[in-house]
């Protein structure tokens, strides 16, 4: 075969491939109408979730209860599945019947793209009372009128403090304002002989464990987007106030010392967690930490409280960041009716919700479960139930690009906190532009 | 030296049209032969089309679309490419990081591999043991090796800094946690695992004819001249192979940088996926393929990621072509190249 023929053949194959690629449709299975109310669901349901270890065992327990109460349905559970895998599987038409995500950030994308089915018809058919859900939870599980997900427990964030370390430093109460937090953090910090930090009062780096702009935002009432849908990180002075407060505390410690301390931190979800080891006196974390401490360090003397609020916004005290696990039916589901039965059970059955909440120490999302006598509530957990009910609690908005706006901000903040960016306002404006540009690319606006 | 010179005029005789007519049985035989050849080539052609050409064409097509994996792609012309060059805040940094790794890691691996191969060849007793020792790191899976390195170089708890402290060196680098040192630490990791390059260079060095060294020695060549005029020309094709494959590998450098940034960053990406935490610290380990992955799978911009993949493909091709052409000039001189 001559070179010319080979080139022609390659060119022809390339053209055909390009045409095939252009004509390839993604799996866009249209949603079948829901079955009649009298039809009973049966068969196997595949169920992916992200939990592992002890938390996965709690899920298994509730799933077993479901199978016992729904004899025609069997559930095949896959643990440790993250959002990226689920998205790829759904796009390939191999998604699970039921998917559980930890992040409300994906709701916008999954609802608008149809990756998760619209649950509206099922809810309407089965007369599911949506008012049984707490309002904030109702809001973050739907996007622009499309309800493609239901809540499976919620997460709230508050302050954990080591009572012994605070008592040693002469404190009997946790801080309520950010200036108190900074002051106590300095006094609670101890150093090694070589000058390195041994125990830190409060770690101000925003990429340390659960510290993040989103989780801090409610305590300054910082907003992500303005009315026009443009990034507000430069225009809302709350962000600037937050980062100024943070930088002052970083400068007190020294960025290099904090970096070194942070580099030596233990695994977040293990007994090596810095708070559990007594290396951090005060820390922002979710309510699930209670279950981890119970399992890892049951003798740790600690307390929980709402995270301090900005000094000039004390009315915010008591609120916190709220998010939650969400669950939906993949668009390629082979057994959507049985999948819906599982979702309905996990999200509206009081017994199931309470059992799961007790098992992994998450906050229930229905009024009935929140007030259930079976819900195990001690003082530490009650703090989070109160934060959950507080009107100043807030969540982060969902966008077509998922949580990219948070990641872009977080990336710049690393420069800020390590001193590689010094002009705060210019930096915030640059981040706002990055967020707007990327959103425009993702949405075509 | 004789030179073949083509005649000024083409004196070939063009046969009359009738004479070119091939008899039917012969035509049939030729067609059958062509079909036979095509049948033999079919497995390759199918594999090439399905596993290379189609994905390449699909990537090219998606690069002109807004595509998030879940919805139908929407044609947006060159917008993805425009965004890359004018708006993406981290594309340039990702390119710079990848270029840094390419420029420093590839030569470092080859030079050190060559030095070690030369060293091992000289050692008569225990040489085989040393070969094994130097080759062993290449067998370690990249993820495991990187995990081990993040432990060794942990600035707070790792043995490297403890050792530095014990021998009286006050300098306590932050290694993977320092934006200025993260890439050099990756370089150390890459050089540690140079066994694969060392083995092929060792094999090549053993093939260099001894007579050439003896002749050079008789001519009074010193060690450097023997290396420059005997060793280097003999091993040049293998060095070139190592350079081309090394450059391509570095342009696609992902695993080690991803694992190191995720582990040194320290926060477990619970449920969200790996894309959440890559690039740490301060995007010092954000290589081009990592940014491509983040945009495609964490930020749902697969069309944009495809545009980046197309650019990576073009750059890889260009690198390879330039490298091959340059080496031909070096080997055979400009005239023949």
Image: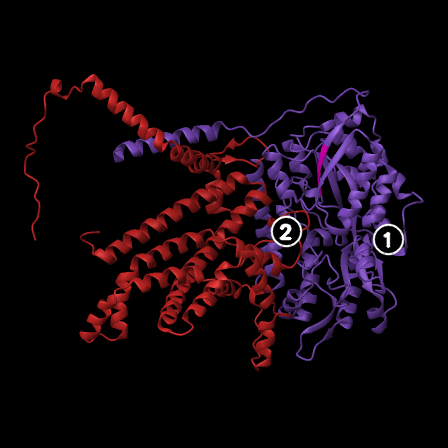
Give whichever of A160, A441 is nearer the camera: A160
In this rendered view, identify the residue nearer to me: B226 or A361: B226
The chain carrying label 2 is A
Measured along the vertical axis of the image, is residue A343 above or below residue B18? below
Pointer 1 residue:
A381
Q: Is disc 2 in the same subunit as disc 1?
A: yes
| Magenta stretch: includes residue A380 | no
x and y percent of residue B336 in the render? 19, 52
Judging from the image, mark 1 belongs to the subunit labelled A
Which portion, as a residue range, is magenta? A45-49
Check whether the beta carbons of the residues at disc 2 and disc 1 lie within 8 A of each other. Answer: no
Most frequent secondary structure within the magenta stretch: strand
Asked whether, in this view, residue A349 is left or right of residue A325, the answer is right
Task: Give the residue pinned by disc 2.
Answer: A234
User: Which colour denotes chain B?
Assistant: red
Q: Colour of chain A?
A: purple
Q: Is residue A218 left or right of residue A115?
A: right
Residue A244 position in % (x across, y down): 68, 61
**For this view, does B305 lie left or right of residue A265?**
left
């Amino acid at each position: 075969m001559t070179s010319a023929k080979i080139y022609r053949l390659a060119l022809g194959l390339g053209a055909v491939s390009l045409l095939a690629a252009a004509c390839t449709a993604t799996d866009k299975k249209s949603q079948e109408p829901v079955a009649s109310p009298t039809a009973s669901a049966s068969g196997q349901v595949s169920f992916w979730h992200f939990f592992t270890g002890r938390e996965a065992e709690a899920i298994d327990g509730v799933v077993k209860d479901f199978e016992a109460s729904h004899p025609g349905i069997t559930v095949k559970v896959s643990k440790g599945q993250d959002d990226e895998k689920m998205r790829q599987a759904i796009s390939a038409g191999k998604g699970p019947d039921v998917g559980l995500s930890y992040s409300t950030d994906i709701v916008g994308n999954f609802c608008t793209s149809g990756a998760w089915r619209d649950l509206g018809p099922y809810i309407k058919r089965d007369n599911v009372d949506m008012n049984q859900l707490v309002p904030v939870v109702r809001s973050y599980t739907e996007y622009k009128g499309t309800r493609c997900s239901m809540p499976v427990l919620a997460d709230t964030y508050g302050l954990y403090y080591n009572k012994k370390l605070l008592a040693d430093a002469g404190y009997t109460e946790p801080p309520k304002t950010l200036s108190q937090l900074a002051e106590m953090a300095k006094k609670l910090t101890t150093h090694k002989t070589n000058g390195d930090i041994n125990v830190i009062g409060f770690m101000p780096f925003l990429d340390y464990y659960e510290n993040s702009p989103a989780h801090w935002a409610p305590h300054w009432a910082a907003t992500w987007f303005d009315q026009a849908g443009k990034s507000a990180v430069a225009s809302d002075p709350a962000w600037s106030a937050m980062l100024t407060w943070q930088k002052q505390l970083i400068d007190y410690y020294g960025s290099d010392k904090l970096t070194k301390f942070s580099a030596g931190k233990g695994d977040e979800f293990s007994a090596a967690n810095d708070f559990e080891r007594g290396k951090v006196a005060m820390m922002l974390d979710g309510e699930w930490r209670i279950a981890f401490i119970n399992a890892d360090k049951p003798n740790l003397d600690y307390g929980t409280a709402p995270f301090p609020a900005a000094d000039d916004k004390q009315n915010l005290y008591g609120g916190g960041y709220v998010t939650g696990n969400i669950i939906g039916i993949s668009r390629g589901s082979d057994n959507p009716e049985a999948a819906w039965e599982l979702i309905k059970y996990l999200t509206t059955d009081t017994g199931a919700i309470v059992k799961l909440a007790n098992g992994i120490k998450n906050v229930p999302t229905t009024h009935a479960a929140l007030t259930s006598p079976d819900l195990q509530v001690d003082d530490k957990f009650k703090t989070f139930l109160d934060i959950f009910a507080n009107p100043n609690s807030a969540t982060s908005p969902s966008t077509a690009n998922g949580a990219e706006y948070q990641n872009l901000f977080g990336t710049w903040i690393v420069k800020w906190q390590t001193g590689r960016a010094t002009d705060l306002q210019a930096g915030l404006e640059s981040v706002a532009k990055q967020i707007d540009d990327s959103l425009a690319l993702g949405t075509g606006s | 030296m004789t030179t073949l010179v083509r005649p000024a005029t083409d004196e070939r005789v063009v046969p009359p049209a009738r004479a070119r007519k091939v008899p039917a049985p012969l035509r049939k035989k030729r067609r059958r032969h062509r079909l036979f050849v095509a049948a033999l080539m079919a497995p390759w052609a199918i594999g090439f089309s399905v596993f290379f050409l189609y994905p390449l064409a699909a990537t090219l097509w998606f690069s002109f679309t807004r595509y998030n994996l879940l919805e139908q792609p929407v044609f947006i012309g060159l917008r993805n490419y425009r965004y890359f060059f004018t708006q993406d805040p981290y594309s340039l940094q990702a390119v710079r990081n990848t270029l840094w790794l390419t420029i420093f890691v590839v030569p470092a691996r080859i030079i050190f591999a060559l030095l070690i191969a030369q060293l091992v060849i000289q050692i008569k007793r225990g040489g085989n043991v040393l070969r094994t020792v130097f080759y062993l790191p290449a067998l370690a899976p990249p993820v495991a090796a990187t995990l081990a390195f993040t432990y060794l170089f942990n600035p707070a708890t790792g043995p490297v800094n403890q050792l530095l402290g014990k021998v009286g060196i006050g300098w306590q680098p932050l290694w993977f946690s320092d934006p200025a040192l993260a890439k050099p630490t990756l370089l150390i990791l890459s050089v540690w695992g140079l066994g694969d390059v060392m083995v092929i260079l060792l094999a090549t060095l053993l093939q260099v004819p001894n007579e050439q060294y003896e002749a050079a020695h008789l001519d009074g060549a010193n060690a450097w001249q023997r290396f420059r005029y005997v060793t280097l020309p003999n091993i040049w094709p293998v060095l070139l192979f190592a350079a081309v494959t090394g450059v391509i590998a570095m342009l696609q450098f992902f695993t080690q940088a991803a694992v190191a940034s995720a582990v040194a960053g320290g926060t477990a990406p619970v449920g969200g996926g790996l894309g959440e935490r890559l690039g740490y610290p301060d995007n010092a380990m954000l290589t081009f393929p990592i940014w491509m992955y983040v945009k495609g799978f964490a930020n749902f911009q697969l069309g944009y990621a495809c545009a980046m993949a197309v650019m990576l493909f073009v750059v890889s091709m260009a690198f390879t072509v330039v490298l091959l052409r340059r080496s031909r000039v070096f080997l055979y001189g400009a005239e023949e190249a």
